[in-house]
Amino acid sequence: MTTHAEQPGPALVDHHCHGVARSPLTAEQFAAYLTESDAPAAPGTTFFDTQLGFALRRWCPPLLGLPEHCPPADYLARRAELGTKEALRRLLGATGIGDFLVDTGLSDGLTGLDELATAAGGRAHEIARLETLAEHAADTAGSTRAFLDALAGAVHAATRTAVAFKSVVAYRHGLDFGPERPAATDVRAAADRWLAARAPGERLRDPVLLRHLLWTAAGTGLPLQLHTGFGDPDLRLHRCDPLLLTDFVRAVAPTGCRLVLLHTYPYHRGAAYLAHAFPHVYTDVGLALTHVGARARAVLAETLELAPFGKVMFSTDAYGLPELYVVGTRLFTEALSGLTDAWVRDGAWAAADARRVTAMIGSGTARRLYGLAPG
């Protein structure tokens, strides 16, 4: 007898992800994508010996013609034998993702929107990263006025091609920024200071300009995605708790901007509260599920304790490896079906409600929020 989760459903919408590597990878390069660390594994250890590494070895080898849990060396040899393009086609084609919302702020050596969509047999849509727009404007601006004009123009232009904006203010400053819109005089003064001291290609970290970006995006009508929770060592985790955004959430509400809290772990319960308390806040645990692996069901359950079901969305945050798309989708679907099937058996949920909520989290809410066509 099939459960509700095993019945065919709509194609998934991965509402936050990245491109994957176009070129063949060495074993060391491959393993580097299995961690948020920016350093090699400790001597005598490997990043394959993690929840993510074990999940990859469970789900990906059969897609390349190997048994589950085969040794990493066997998997990498088979991947090299097939070639990057064929491995990409097999892996992405098995995810069940119909729409990819791609953060284009990280693109060096990675597939673009069209390449990703073609390999997966789906559709790709752009998420415009605010800090990247500002840095590109600064690269060519000859004055503060020219920079601010170029930045405003870049944000406006992005609304014609992107379905949302994304900010990494959590990395560049932290989420404990002043919640109010900065005054125009303060923005000009901050731009003067940053441009005068900026080295070519230097990243934007000025808190006034970062706030200016957030408020500029809030006025466009597009959703605004915010990195929260864990990531690589560039951030300070205690300053990435989404609860630090509470005053900003309140302040931005009159603009109508929908805020999307990405990743959230280990603060996913706080993010669920914000989604519960504020109509314009949405949440996910995409990157978290990939890294917690066999514990994905527990983490997703904690999010669903309080977050309204129509405010939670699926994502993988896959980056660099098509395997991360496979792992992200398999862990999500297994976790969600395991939870909802148990709740149906216990009589807590009706089977029809379980099917409806599964479709909402997997694709329906994202299609509504980002204005996507039916899958």
Image (tube, rainbow, N blue to C red):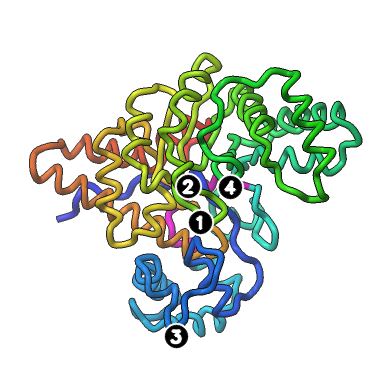
Nearer-N-terminus badge (4/3): 3
Find residue 246 and report its horizontal and vertical position in percent: 43, 26
Marks 1/4: CA distance? 10 Å
In the depicted structure, whether residue 84 falls above or below residue 290: below
Residue kind at label 3, given as amino acid type: Asp
Region in magenta: 91-103
User: Image quarter for residue 346?
Assistant: top left
Query: Is the Cβ of the residue at disc 1 closer than 8 Å to that at disc 2?
Result: yes
Find residue 214 and report its horizontal and vertical position in percent: 61, 29
Find disc 1 in the rendering and name its residue.
318
User: Image quarter for residue 53?
Assistant: bottom left
Nearer-N-terminus badge (4/2): 2
Q: Residues within 10 Å of mark 4 (few under 14, many from 20)?
A: many
Nearer-N-terminus badge (2/3): 2
Q: Which mark is residue 74?
A: 3
Q: Residues within 10 Å of mark 2 (few under 14, many from 20)?
A: many
Find disc 4 in the rendering and name its residue.
102
Find disc 2 in the rendering and name its residue.
14
Residue kind at label 2, given as amino acid type: Asp
